[in-house]
Amino acid sequence: MARVEGGVVSPVIADGASSPPGVVQTLALGDGDRVLGVVHDHATTPDLSALRDRLGVTGIPYQTLALQSLDNLEDLSDYTILFLTNLETLSLRQVVVLEQWYNRGGRLIVSGPLGTRSSGDVQQMLRNLMGAYWDEGFPAGTNPSPRVLTSWAPRLGASDLQAGVVVPIRLDSAPVAVWQGERTQGAAVVANGRSVFLGWNWGETGATAAEFDRRWLQASLQYFGTFSLARSGLGTSTTAGAGFTTAQRLPNPDPLPPLRPGAGDRPSRSDPPAQSSPPRSVTPGPATPGPATPRSTTPPAPNPSRPGADITVEPDPETDPSQQVAQPGLDVGLTGEPIVFLEAVAMRQELNNLLGRFQNGHLALRLAQAQGSAGACLPGGGGCPSPGSAPLASTALKAMDVAQVAVAFNPSVNRLLTTVQATLRSFPQDVAARNYDEARRQWLAARRQLWDSYPQSQPLQPEVRAVWLDRGTLVEAGSPQGLTQIFDQLQASGINVVFLETINAGYTIYPSRVAAEQNPLIRGWDPLEVGVKLAHERGMELHAWMWTFAVGNMAHNRLLGLPPTDMGPVLRHHPDWVNIDNYGRRIQPNSGKMFLDPANPAARNYLLSLIDEISDRYDVDGVQLDYIRYPFQDMAGGFTFGYGSAARQQFKAQTGVDPVTLQSRSPLWGQWLEFRKTQITEFVASAADLLRRQHPDVALSVAVFPFPTHERNAKIQQDWETWAKAGDVDMVVLMSYALDTNRFQDLTQPWLQDPELQSTLIIPGIHLPHLGEVETLDQVQFLRDNASAGYALFAMDHLEETLRSQFHPTVTSAMDQTLPHRDPFGAAALRFGALTQEWDFLYGQGELSVRPTSLDTWQGQRQALARTLDALAQDPSAARLQAARTALTSFEANLNDWLYLHALEHPYPMQTWEHRLATVQVLLNYGERVVLQQQRDLKRDLLADRP
């Protein structure tokens, strides 16, 4: 990075080269500064002088990065925007790093023939990443000229461009400019919400194109809302001395559009409920991206030392960012409008995916019927192996020969599948013939038929099936007898983990020796004590769900008849623990909630004492930290939190600067952001250490947002990936709340497939208040078809009887007795056993095609892998783990070859099986961290105790 010398910005180039005279390449300020990362290829651009000259005239602060230096995610941690300049050859590792960075909130500008000399796999990954690809270049001397289609794009031409056609392939990717002329047709620039693809070699043409390049790069940054022509004074420079010029600093980017947020730290039953609705579609934003509206991102000078006026009226939940639910991603109606190419692709893909989930759901139902017919592991029937007592993967096969049980599809389901498949075949033809209304009518009818015949949920593999049991439901239960009825309902629905709301708005639901007050609405009984007993009697786990740093709530004050601005029992007794914003306000203005200062040692010790008390006095199976974050902040709205007295003192001791003097463009703003993020991370580590030392059988989970990393850390300082990678949490429960499975996939899949989180059990949450029964079942089926360890339903107060009946399992087995976080190796063996049962069943029904020459090899490797997984589950060791990994890797590598014929006709099931094998790998990784590390720690402690 650059450094400041006497107020002059002095450049230090990332890839070791020196700076050309008069050009400043980087800002010498903190991590909070926005510097454009410009990635170039040393192999094709050994001399960077031309590229630097072209970048220098833009007035944009930048730092050059050699493509060859990209090796891990940390290499890109300082950047929110990257400019990939004319990169034709990328390795798989480099693209994986870019994909990880992008999935965590990064934004991309690309120029030239991206990846055209790379392998096929790399090209496909880049297409998926950008939503577009470089198709072909124009011959030399063509002199293409672009015609712009949007208001934010610059309207000028250039000569001698080395240009080509960019092809959009996603619904959200659309042309911004097109080439015009007889020999030059096609998109010149394609953009979507987080990327811009420029269809020419930026910086590689003569001086006539310099202005063209400059204007398009500036416009692309302005499109992302990170650069304002009026604010930054582009095209001008101010001499700073010593032959250097000052570059304009990029302000923080505008908040990302509300496509990813899940509902926040969930409203309780007493809060104003959101209205439920039947399956519906919500109109997405315009297909053609528009510019972000420039606005100031610098909040007023903070003055938290002077108390601000707290809000006195309870906020509308609609204004609370923590309550947002992601809208559906595809709007289909009989509009009479043409169906454009990308819309047709999206509609066909959506119907294909729904059909795949529908078929997998019915397959699970048929398997359950086959198990019941075989009489194996029926409820109360015995004969089911317990974890560690018998070969799990192979015993599952011996317990019932499902291949010999003929269970045919229901004739009406068969007819429905035929109809939907016919619709998928005719849909492209109707679109090509411009029969748009007919195409939409048939599509909508097919979707409705699938919804109307959607199968019940049937669990056939070890998974977490959790529910949040909210305070409102506990208050309504009113007694042990009322709570007993609730647990009976949960047991009948197959729930095996209950997150029981134990601390809400600073009140405990149990009589505490640490907390000041028990919830006044719960008197005369202890719901936590009763809940633990009821859960264990039914073979369930009970985890104490606690509000962590949020300790007051205006909505709860209303229920108790307290003044709206009452700070709650904790801050009433300890007003110096409060978290304050830069206006001096103690109440988050959008949510109406009050928070502790995470930097306050006394407040943190109080919370740790509560965790210790709950884990010591009650036989809980886990603790879940909710509100494990700062209050939501809004730089564009002008407020940030974190100015409690303890935080100010500590930060000033570290830096010599009181954070109240900082603004978003201050040199230490990035350090101030990191300071707050660290407070949360350190508390999670302290909670994990407490439980490991004092209560090693108590699992620790966190309820967190699925936002991209940059956005989440900037707004709420919730760096949960760091907690997961450090091994401090057993489960990451995502509040991935969405109104349809399409958007639910967008929220969850990047995390489920993140290569750096493959030792973490991720449990996505499903938001019941906004979903009908079918949408809920469909989201559950999506998770079972992907690399998820389970799901969590929010919340019990919306788990109605009609929905509960859809989760009634037909049979039970060892699968239901094994929880992934308790016995990961046993769960891995059982999951693979469930997969082999499915293959045997399909093969026995004549519904699975295996390459004839590979049948013996396939069966032999299946059995070998099952044996290694069984051996690991029964007697875990590093050597057995390595053997299991080797066998699993070999099996995964050959699966596509063995089932090649089946994959050609049935790509969705093939993809599902690959995901389920990936989950087995995650369980092995998690088991290594939890089971084997515990063995090593125990051995170390025993040796330390010897005289």
Image (cartoon, rainbow, N blue to C red):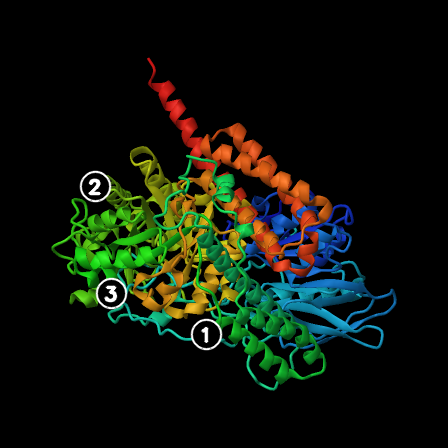
Mark 1 residue type: Pro
Q: Are marks 2 and 1 in contact (CB under 8 Å)?
A: no
Rendering coords of residue 241 (x, y %):
61, 51
Q: Secondary structure at mark 1?
A: loop
Nearer to us: label 2 or label 3: 2
Tag 1 residue: 279
Q: Residue at coordinates 20% horizontally, 50% vertically from top-left?
A: 530
Classify residue 808 as left or right of residue 413. Answer: left
Q: Gap between marks 2 and 1, in whole Å?
A: 45 Å
Residue lying at the far top in this picture: please name it. Answer: 947
Nearer to us: label 2 or label 1: 1
Q: Residue at coordinates 32% horizontally, 52% vertically from top-left?
A: 498
Give the camera-side residue of 708 and 619.
Answer: 619
Q: Is residue 35 visible?
A: no
Give the camera-side residue of 326 and 619.
Answer: 619
Tag 3 residue: 554
Q: Gap between marks 3 and 1, in whole Å?
A: 32 Å
Q: Gap between marks 2 and 3, in whole Å?
A: 30 Å
Q: Residue at coordinates 71% horizontally, 60% vertically from top-left?
A: 111
Q: Which mark is residue 617?
A: 2
Q: Secondary structure at mark 3?
A: helix
Q: Secondary structure at mark 2?
A: helix
Q: Earlier in the sequence, mark 3 or mark 1?
A: 1
Rendering coords of residue 275 (x, y %):
35, 74
Within-10-Å neighbours for mark 1: few <14, some 14–19, many 20+: some
Mark 3 residue type: Met
Give the camera-side residue of 660 and 6.
Answer: 660
Q: Is residue 214 visible?
A: yes
Rendering coords of residue 907 (x, y %):
64, 59
Marker count (numbered): 3
Within-10-Å neighbours for mark 2: few <14, some 14–19, many 20+: few
